[in-house]
Image (tube, rainbow, N blue to C red):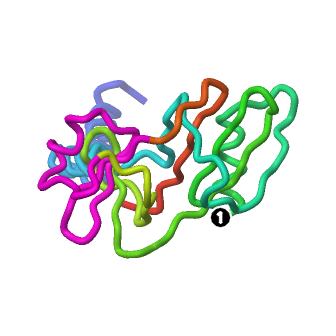
């Protein structure tokens, strides 16, 4: 069989394969849309180092393995269906937290809705703020929108702690 005879058949096979790949591949618009959606979605966890929620919103605890850390605590809290946790380095303990669901929305540092719960109390300003930017200007641990106002929350300091919030917003 000569090469001259197989080239046309090979060209047809290549053309069919390219057409199939082109139909199956997402367009640039689809890729851009997917990337934009992911960028707008909150991360599964929100972390704040050096803060604690002592004796409030308690929902149990779990010891963490000797080689574990706050990342393991985050996974254990999420698997247990908890809204958050405090990980203490000194005791290697994960303290679970559940927060009230009262119509509030908690926001991350980028201004994206993160979770549908409130961390009541710990307000910097008892009157709230009129905008997210105004609430962020006082450098809070977290910002919550509730009852039409923005609430800047500053949580108690704890050098041995990491606060972990589990996002319940799915994209």
- Residue 148: quadrant of the picture: bottom left
Q: Position of residue 133 (x, y in %)?
A: 15, 42
User: Does the rendering let one see residue 20?
Assistant: no
Residues rendered magenta in the picture: 125-154
| Residue 7 within the segment the image draws in magenta | no
160 to 9, vertically: above or below: above
Q: Which residue appears at 81% of the width and 32% of the height?
A: 91
Which type of secondary structure does the marked residue at label 1 adopt? loop
Residue 167 coordinates in the image, percent (x, y): 47, 55
Residue at screen point 56% across, 44% down: 164
Provide the residue designation for mark 1: 81
Looking at the picture, tell me which residue is in the foreground, 63 or 14.
63
- The image position of residue 151, as x and y in percent, is 28, 54
> Residue 71 versus residue 37: which sits nearer the camera?
71
Find residue 22 and report its horizontal and vertical position in percent.
24, 47
From where the camera sits, is residue 124 visible?
yes
Number of other residues with Cα within 10 Å of mark 1, as a class: few under 14, some 14 to 19, many 20 or more: few
């Amino acid at each position: 069989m000569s090469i001259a005879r197989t080239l046309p058949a090979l060209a047809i096979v290549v053309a069919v394969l390219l057409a199939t790949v082109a139909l199956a591949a997402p367009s640039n618009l689809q890729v851009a849309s997917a990337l934009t959606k992911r960028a707008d979605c909150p991360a599964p966890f929100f972390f704040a180092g050096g803060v604690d929620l002592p004796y409030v919103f308690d929902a149990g605890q779990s010891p963490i393995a000797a080689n574990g850390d706050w990342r393991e605590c985050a996974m254990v809290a999420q698997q247990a269906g908890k809204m958050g946790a405090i990980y203490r380095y000194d005791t290697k303990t994960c303290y679970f937290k559940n927060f009230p669901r009262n119509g509030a929305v908690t926001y991350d540092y980028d201004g994206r809705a993160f979770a549908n719960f409130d961390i009541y109390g710990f307000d910097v300003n008892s009157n709230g703020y009129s905008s997210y930017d105004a609430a962020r200007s006082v450098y809070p641990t977290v910002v919550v929108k509730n009852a039409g106002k923005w609430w800047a929350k500053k949580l108690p300091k704890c050098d041995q702690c990491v606060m972990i919030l589990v996002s319940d917003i799915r994209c």
